[in-house]
Amino acid sequence: MTANWFEAKIKYIKVHEDGKERKVTESYLLDALTYTEAESRILHEMESVIKGDYYLHILKKSNITEIVNSTDETDDRWYKARVAIIDADEISGKEKSSFTNYLIAAANIDKALSNLQKSLSTFVVPYEIVNLTDTNFMDVYPYVAEENPKEENPEEGKSE
């Protein structure tokens, strides 16, 4: 099953380090099956992050299709890359490209390029990194399936 990534923008009043309150808008990316689920999940996630009032300003489908995570704790920013996967048309012999958008966790743009290249190293087809830019995503919430509730034993409760 492919991921359905949604971009959510949350507005709230944030107390900055200087003690002043300012209205901010923060962007988050989350995987969900529907808009309704995306809205519910992002609001639930924000309960533990934001103290006080907040609201969902924008929720839209994202064009990101792949996520490149990192185990390095210093990789705390998110970068977006557009990758062209190059394929040759067997009939005409012409090259054609299909594009995929990646979101990469990294500490800086050089590390993002390195992390992306490492992720793409298993490709057997030629590719080209067309674009790599910084994003303003604060965090990414992948889909996590809920554990199945404890199944009842059908033999329990039966008398012999």
Image (cartoon, helix red, strand yellow):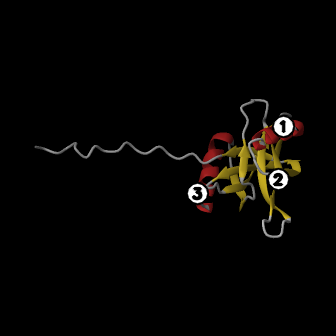
Tell me whether circle 3 and circle 1 mark residues in contact (CB < 8 Å): no
Disc 1 target residue: 114
Say whether disc 1 or disc 2 marks the residue closer to the N-terminus: 2
Q: Which mark is residue 83?
A: 2
Q: Amino acid at mark 2?
A: Val
Nearest the eye: 33 or 92: 92
Question: Which quadrant would the C terminus be assigned to in this image?
Answer: top left
Q: Amino acid at mark 3?
A: Glu
> Relative to 41, is 118 on the left or the right?
right
Nearest the eye: 71 or 89: 89
Q: CA distance from mark 3 to mark 1?
A: 34 Å
- Residue at 82% x, 53% y is 83
> Relative to 134, is 62 on the left or the right?
left
Instruction: Give the residue at the far bottom of this rendering.
Output: 92
Q: Residue 117 location in percent, x, y?
A: 81, 41
Q: Nearer the viewer, mark 3 or mark 1?
A: 1
Q: Residue 35 location in percent, x, y?
A: 63, 61
Nearest the eye: 17 or 134: 134
Disc 3 target residue: 37
Say whether disc 3 or disc 1 marks the residue closer to the N-terminus: 3
Q: Hey, which quadrant is residue 113 in on the image?
A: top right
Q: Nearer the viewer, mark 3 or mark 2?
A: 2
- Residue at 22% x, 44% y is 155
